[in-house]
Image (tube, grey):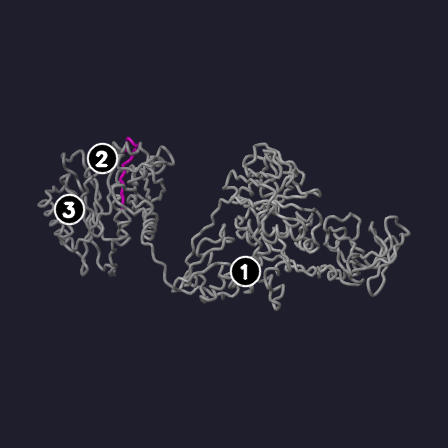
Amino acid sequence: MLISKKWLQDFVDLPSHVSDEEIANRITLSTVEVEKMESQAASLEKIVVGQILQVYPHPNADRLRVCDVNVGKETLSIVCGGSNLQEGMKVAVALVGAKVRWHGQGDLVEIQLTKLRGVDSFGMICSANEIGIATGKEGEREVLDVSILTAVPGTLLSEALELNDVILDVDNKSLTNRPDLFSHRGMAREIAALLDTTFHDAEPPVLSKGEGYELSVTVADPELCPRYMGVVLDGIRIEPSPDWMQKRLLAVGMHPINNVVDVTNYVMLEMGQSLHAFDAKKLENQSGAKQTIEIRVQRAQDEETFVTLDGEERTLDASMLMICDGKKSVTLAGIMGGKNSEIDENTTAIFLESANFHPSCIRTTSQKLGLRSEASLRYEKSLDPHLSDVALCRTVELLCQIIPGAHVVSPVADVSHFSLHQGPILFSMEKLISKIGIGISSKETEGILQRLGFALKKEGEDFLVTIPTWRATKDISIFEDLVEEVVRVYGYDRIPCLLPMGKMEPPKQDLSRLLQRQVRSILSQHFFATETYNYSFVSPAILSAMKENVSLYIELENPLSKERPYLVRSLVPNLLENVKKNQHGFDPVCLFEIGRTYLQEEQGEENGETNTFLPRQDHVLGLVFAGKSGDSLHQVKRICAGLLETLGYSYMFSPFQEKMFWMQKGISACISVCGEDVGYFTEVKSDVLAELGVDVSTTVMELNLTKMTQLPKQKKVYEFIPLFPEGKRDLAFVIGEQVAYGEMEKVLRAQTPLLRGIELFDVYTGKGIPEGKKSIALHFVFRADDHTLSSEEVDGIMENIRRVLEEQFFAIVRG
């Protein structure tokens, strides 16, 4: 996007001490990248006004002629092929060393002394496109005729044509959120804020109601067209626009066409609002009444065809917005006008449109048709609807200024369906400083926001900031947007590059995750268990085999699979399914999983959106041991004890009242840590295993890791390595089936401090054991700290243990 410095100066006072390079750099650092900056005078260096004194035929070429040209200090002989060369004509002469583009194409070429068909040529008589000032109306072989100029030969062409502007080439791809900057007025406002200088925003005149034409405007879909304005002007005479306007348009890459079209393009580039002019006499109405214009803004018909100004016939669909008169479509809304209503040399009255369209509608239509224009480029960015009024008034003002006799002959139509009202944003100075890390004074902050067009109201130490309409379409909406505005105008380059300062504190440990990592490490490295990951969902078939109460499970409304519609209450069902799949490939199978369980009858965290409580979701360790050896219970007990000891917890196994059908009665234990029940282990009933398809003895364990995270661990006390050996004994006895091992172990440990360890290594029921009884085998370890225990001492202790078992537990010692 090209921006003219001279055009900017209509709106902003650029300080004389600030160079063009500094302005471009400031814009780049704070707003948008200026890709390059071009001086018109520099591009026309060594190109002067020359006057042709004589024209001779070329001796060796029919299409070339030799000219004697006065360039001020000397007369040069120049060979030229221009078709319009005449004696006395003033032309643009590129002296040796000047740079031009051959026929306006390709890269710049430096002019040198050369021979053309055997005749020396000491320069080049240029066409307009060869020096970059073509209007598009020149003949292919015509040189630039500047005879109208009063400048004497030898005058620099840039001075003679007053081409002394500086053009900024702005990368507009990064301005999609700033529709206000797609104009000289908006860019001038931005530069005034950056340089802290004065911005001049002249108010356009208010349009008076004209007489002669009646206007009727209907908008079928207000969402697609929030505002539509229009007015009719008569007394129009189509001719070239004034020289000053053409120069400005050419400077920013817009070719002049005629006075009416040039004015609409001029206002678009100046104000940022696209406009369109129709030949009023080509617009029809349904009633047939003269001097009545009927405008309808509506969607196109599917498969409708429409010829745009470029002469292309385009096929439309019902998603595209059209401007129609009473009988036909006349404009592709916001993109391009129609051939059937274009301005031509016979136009004497125009209908002038200034509207606001929905950005996504324009963008979609443009993409579907492969048609983009300067108008669509701006509408796609969400233009301010208030701009329609300002731009319409400015356009009428210019038309009446450059076309004598032009005047308004209708009321101003204004159909509006928009609201950009947005409440003020509270701007906290304390929050500003905390976000940017440096102190900016309240006065400087206030000045920056006011220069950008924001209205401020003091609220204690803070401000209530009202957003201007040209920034309210999709740009500024929250406090952080205002922080960005302050910082970029203040200058990112003024903020020192410092590392963030803060207290160096170790990160807070997540005890739950730490415990889970420790559990994984111990089970996999010490006990060679394999971790598995299962879904948090469970199959009704497994629950049915385990005789589980399905009503206690949470059923998902939209499960990933209909085969698993319930959230797990326990990790055991899925672990038993894992055993079924692995039992024939591994022996034993030792698997564990750490996952969540979901209990709907217990409250968990509160759901802030619905003010209800989520189900309780604890992290649980599930473990299964299955093998053909039949000792799965003892293996699980050993793993559990080893895990808890390694973690540093004091624990105890106690009788467990089986709650589930699938638990083997009497062969289970409750696991307590620091007096809190945290889990259990139990054998699984053989008939349940059979229904699940498991063929081997299986014991499962669950530990509630969420509970364990809250419990204290034992303090580790250093103990000397034992100096004296241990004494070991085994004892087998028959005891009542209902006697719990945990209670019995507690009593036996209290008999003597020399008892250092008890291990249950066998439980047997069956042949040779009376009904209601079970055979238990224990392994005892004894040690003294000050001497080696003799066999007699160990035997005496064992005798006491037998007596306690017989008297308190009615045990019968075997063997």
**Relative depth, front residue between 292 and 371:** 292
Q: Amino acid at mark 1?
A: Ser
Determine if residue 339 is in view: yes
Answer above or below: position of 434 versus 545: below
Q: Is residue 267 left or right of residue 578?
A: right
In reply to whether residue 691 is colored magenta, the answer given is yes
Mark 2 vs mark 3, CA separation in Å: 26 Å
Residue contact between numbered discs 1 and 2, judged by CB atoms under 8 Å: no
Percent position of residue 289, x then y? 61, 35
Comparing labels 1 and 2, the label whose residue is closer to the camera: 1
Of marks 2 and 3, which one's residue comes earlier in the chain?
Answer: 2
Answer above or below: position of 539 versus 793: above
Determine if residue 484 is in view: no
In the rendered structure, find residue 661 and report the number of the disc placed on it.
2
**Which element type, helix, strand or loop, lies under badge 1?**
helix
Crowdedness near tag 2: few (<14), some (14–19) or many (≥20) residues, C-alpha within 10 Å: some
Percent position of residue 630, x then y? 26, 38
In reply to whether residue 653 is colored magenta, the answer given is no
